[in-house]
């Protein structure tokens, strides 16, 4: 038994920071792009043309083999892939959770044929890939959550509420449903009164038809089958209105979906793991995951 456990830990350690391409062969919805991936200041990247998952495996996996897909934010213009991606993945590893940072394509008409659907295609493909290779990655297909920050929170919420919409031709639409969602200062709505204008403009455009506004306003699609959610934000967020998170939470509550929301008095936007009062929302999250039996230590 001890020898088997040693081999498992050795295997997981050897797969640390594994890069997993989302697609084999042609990338759907892609056209010849004049840009190449660019690394910006402060740990951000843009012009993603080859989406992938960057896998972080825990050295001491939780007994339920839970995993998460992490969607960094950046207003659908760039990805804050370090402090809202890699750093967060390591924090999940500390809980025994396998973490897969999603480097997803951004909505850019120059590089794709249908920009509004591209991020959703990539996160759906990521979920499908993990669920169909769960044994290879040592994870439980029923316990794969989705985590998102800011615009990445909108992507995570879209997957959580629109998992039956097939942006990609999958065998089973319900197969794409996350086990739970973790939304950190998320964009939720595309309504002008609530949304983050930059995210809306880049995803669906300033003068988007009402059908697109409605489709990408996640609070409108919550029902009793929506995955449980853990939500974190700051009341003084001047970038993304707190009404996004509050509206999502109220809709979850009305549909009797398990949910927890933490609204910190201060913190602004984009704090990642670090709140100014030194509280740790990741510890609150661990308590919630234990409460809802998404993790269980041996």
Image (spheres, rainbow, N blue to C red):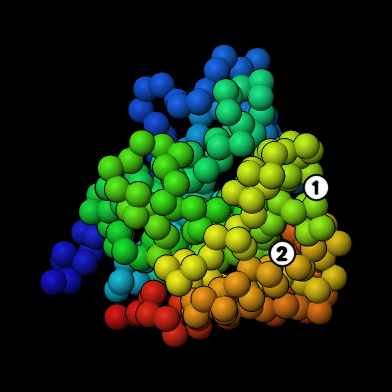
Q: Is residue 87 left or right of residue 228?
A: right
Residue 34 bears which disc, if any? none
Q: What is the crowding at mark 1: few (fewer than 14 residues within 10 Å), some, or many (at least 20)?
A: some
State the residue at coordinates (73%, 44%).
200
Could you tell me residue 14's position as x and y percent? 33, 49
Q: Secondary structure at mark 2?
A: helix
Residue 244 bears which disc, if any? 2
Q: Is residue 297 left or right of residue 205?
A: left
* Mark 1 to mark 2 CA distance (whole Å): 13 Å
Q: Which residue ends up furthest to the front in the rendered image?
A: 210
Could you tell me residue 31's position as x and y percent? 55, 17
Could you tell me residue 255's position as x and y percent? 52, 76
Q: Is residue 99 above or below residue 172?
A: below
Q: Which residue is mark 1?
A: 197
State the residue at coordinates (61%, 36%).
116
- The image quadrant where one finds the C terminus is bottom left
Q: How many marks?
A: 2
């Amino acid at each position: 038994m001890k020898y088997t456990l040693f081999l498992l830990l050795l295997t997981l350690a050897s797969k640390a920071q594994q890069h997993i391409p989302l697609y084999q062969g042609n990338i759907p919805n892609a056209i010849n792009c004049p840009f190449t991936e660019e690394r910006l200041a402060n740990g951000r990247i843009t012009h993603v043309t080859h989406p992938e998952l960057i896998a972080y495996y825990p050295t001491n996996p939780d007994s339920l083999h839970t995993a998460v897909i992490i969607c960094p934010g950046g207003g659908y213009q760039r990805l804050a892939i370090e402090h809202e991606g890699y750093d967060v993945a390591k924090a999940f590893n500390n809980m025994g959770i396998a973490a897969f940072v999603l480097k997803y394509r951004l909505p850019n008409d120059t590089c794709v044929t249908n920009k509004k659907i591209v991020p959703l295609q990539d996160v759906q493909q990521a979920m499908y890939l993990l669920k169909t290779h769960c044994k290879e990655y040592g994870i439980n297909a029923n316990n794969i959550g989705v985590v998102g920050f800011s615009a990445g929170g909108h992507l995570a919420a879209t997957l959580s509420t629109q998992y039956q919409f097939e942006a990609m031709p999958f065998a089973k639409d319900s197969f794409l449903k996350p086990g739970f969602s973790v939304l950190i200062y998320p964009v939720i709505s595309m309504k002008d009164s609530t949304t983050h204008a930059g995210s809306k403009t880049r995803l669906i455009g300033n003068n988007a038809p009402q059908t697109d506004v409605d489709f990408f306003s996640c609070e409108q699609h919550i029902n009793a089958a929506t995955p449980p959610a853990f939500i974190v934000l700051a009341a003084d967020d001047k970038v993304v209105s707190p009404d996004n998170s509050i509206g999502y939470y109220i809709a979850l509550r009305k549909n009797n979906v398990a949910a927890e929301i933490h609204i910190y008095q201060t913190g602004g936007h984009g704090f990642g793991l670090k709140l100014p009062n030194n509280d740790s929302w990741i510890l609150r999250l661990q308590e919630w995951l234990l409460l809802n039996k998404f993790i269980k230590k041996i």
